[in-house]
Image (cartoon, rainbow, N blue to C red):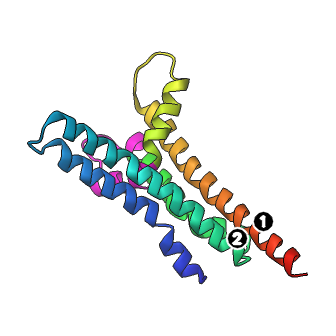
């Protein structure tokens, strides 16, 4: 796989997170029965999570089977997470609320959005005062991006292992 394709495919989890957020925003304001709103809310939260996890595993597995060099794979697949985290820290910790750019703030959060339901639960486990502030948001963002990276790396090593097994079987 060409590096530019891999760099573009690395944007897919962010797009899934953005679509989940758009769907969630629409569901909340629909005049539907409460049970249906709850079902659609859970779907808009957890379907992107599952889709992003499956996608990261698939992409990693494919690159591992193609013997893509690991450092190059990591650089090409994790660049959106690095840019997103830098934007998030800049927009929410160094820029005042009045001066914050809506676009940059959204781009700082969208890469972490697919795994945010899981990351928020992990953050609550570490929270002692049961208050959600900027520190907890940053920690949840880091957890989410770390989960995406771990899934990508696990998929990569899974693909490498399958490739080695196929070579051993052919020999």
Please give the name of the residue rendered at 55% of the width and 61% of the height, measured from the top-left corner. 56
Q: Position of residue 121 (x, y in %)?
A: 48, 32
**Residue segment shown in magenta:** 92-114
Assign the N terminus to one quadrant of the image: bottom right
Please give the name of the residue rendered at 39% of the width and 42% of the height, measured from the top-left corner. 92
Residue 87 included in the magenta stretch of the image: no
Residue 101 included in the magenta stretch of the image: yes
Q: Secondary structure at mark 2?
A: helix
Whichever of callouts 1 and 2 sits on the residue coming sooner in the sequence is: 2
Q: Secondary structure at mark 1?
A: helix
Residue 36 in the figure: left or right of residue 100 = left
Residue 36 in the figure: left or right of residue 50 = left
Q: Which residue occupies the foreground of this view, 128 or 164?
A: 164
To which residue does mark 2 refer? 64
Majority secondary structure of the magenta segment? helix
- Evaluate if marks 1 and 2 touch, with contact meaning CB atoms under 8 Å apart: yes
Residue 108 showing in the rendered view: no
Q: Position of residue 98 (x, y in %)?
A: 24, 42
In the displayed structure, 157 sits above or below 171; it is above
Residue 72 falls in image quadrant: bottom right
Q: Residue furthest top?
A: 129
Q: Position of residue 46 (x, y in %)?
A: 40, 46
Q: Position of residue 22 (x, y in %)?
A: 25, 54
| Residue 161, numbered circle | 1
């Amino acid at each position: 796989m060409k590096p530019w394709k891999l760099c573009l495919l690395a944007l897919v989890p962010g797009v899934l997170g953005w679509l989940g957020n758009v769907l969630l925003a629409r569901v909340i304001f629909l005049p539907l029965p409460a049970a249906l709103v709850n079902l659609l809310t859970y779907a808009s939260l957890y379907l992107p999570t599952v889709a992003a996890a499956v996608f990261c595993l698939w992409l990693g597995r494919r690159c591992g089977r193609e013997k893509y060099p690991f450092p190059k794979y990591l650089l090409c697949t994790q660049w959106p997470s690095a840019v997103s985290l830098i934007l998030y820290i800049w927009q929410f910790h160094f820029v005042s609320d009045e001066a914050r750019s809506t676009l940059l703030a959204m781009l700082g959060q969208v890469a972490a959005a697919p795994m945010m339901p899981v990351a928020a639960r992990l953050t609550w486990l570490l929270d002692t005062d049961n208050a959600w502030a900027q520190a907890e948001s940053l920690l949840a963002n880091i957890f989410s991006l770390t989960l995406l990276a771990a899934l990508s790396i696990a998929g990569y090593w899974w693909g490498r292992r399958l490739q080695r097994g196929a070579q051993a079987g052919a020999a």
